[in-house]
Image: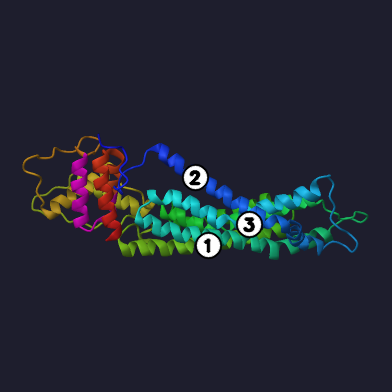
Amino acid sequence: MPSAMQPDDPGAEQPFLSHLVELRDRMIRMSIAVGLVVLLVFPFANDLYSYVAAPLLAQLPAGNTMIATQVASPFLTPFKLALVGAVFLSMPYLLYQLWAFVAPGLYQHEKRLAVPLLISSILLFYVGMAFAYFVVFPLVFAFMAGTTPAGVEMMTDISSYLDFVLTLFFAFGLAFEIPIATILLVAIGAVTPDVLASKRPYVVVGVFVVGMLLTPPDVISQTLLALPMWLLFELGVFFSRILLRQREKEGRGPGPDSGGALTTPSVSTSKPGATSGPAAGGAGQSVAAGSSEGWHPLSEDEMEAELDLIDVAEGESRDQDAPVAAPAAGGSVNSIEEKIRRANRLRELDNEFAARQVLYEVLEEGDADQRRVARNILLQLDQG
């Protein structure tokens, strides 16, 4: 009896248990990496805390210092900073382990998009933290020290200060990921750059609300978080337009000029006596709807209509031995084999996007052999 998993077959699917084992192994590696970095950082924990506290100490009045109100704070607070710092320093390796776990399930064109996004997301997170430390902290602490009421000594607890700065580090690091989130939303077809640009007034209000919730109750820190978030949103819209323009050149997706509409080759049916049937109407409506409302994946009815038009235009005949019956009311084809034949026909006609749609249906509905054939065709499309 053949085994359920053949190691020499790259298209074979691993059982669910093997995925859990691999995930466990990678989480163990991540934990070991963080533990090793903690051991390296902990001897310098007090120096690291002094460096993090420098923006506040520079703004304290003469003679004022930070205090520890709990017995274990002088030890636990630097240790907590060393642990969090180890996670931040290990972030590239941690994300690499997550990427190595997910990458085998991605197609080649998805990997080409994911790798630069992964690298840029790490860099943007570090840039956000640096922006908070070098720009935001001096201004915020100067504002706090300048507004201290008369008769009140500003002496901040070291544990409360650490919680405060870690919150700001995380808030600014996450805010600087806005371009990545914007590009991903456009890449998966959830929105288009034109739709995002039309929502700009709501985005401006939203970033100030987020800045108010994530920063201390002062106008300076709120503005210093809101303005970069807005500029990063505009940067994400700009790069998403470049992404769609590149996809249009490759013929793999919607183009920017059409507002995200599906760029499907037009098919002319000018046969004498031909009438406009439901298939033609459905195809025209799908393209028209895409150009006015933004791109959306073809439904089964719309895809069947497009395939019927291509069959008529090219004059291709059906298999004489096994004629294919008309599609059912739901618009689905009779068999998975027919879908594979249609995908090959679409690939020969350079309609790569529609061919991928059909192959994705085969991956969901077919058996192991049919899915293997579909994956091979998708791999050929990626390499072609």
The magenta-colored residue range is 336-356
Please say whether residue 339 is one of the residues in the magenta stretch: yes
- Can the viewer see residue 208? no
Q: In whole angstroms, how far apart are the C-alphas of marks 2 and 1?
A: 40 Å
Whether the residues at callouts 2 and 1 have beta carbons within 8 Å, the answer is no
> Is residue 165 left or right of 339 when viewed as pictured?
right
Report the residue that reaches farthest toward the left.
Answer: 320
Task: Give 307 or 246, whichever is nearer the viewer.
Answer: 246
Badge nearest the viewer, 2 or 1: 2
What residue type is disc 1 on?
Answer: Glu
At x 23%, y 38%, the residue is: 332
The quadrant the C terminus occupies is bottom left
The type of residue carrying mark 3 is: Phe
Residue 242 placement (x, y as % from top left): 42, 65
183 is higher (above) or lower (below) than 301: below
| Chain-order first, disc 1 or disc 3 | 3
Residue under label 1, please give it.
234
Q: Quickly name the residue at label 2.
A: 25
Sequence-first tag of 3 and 2: 2
Tag on residue 172?
A: 3
Amino acid at pointer 2: Asp
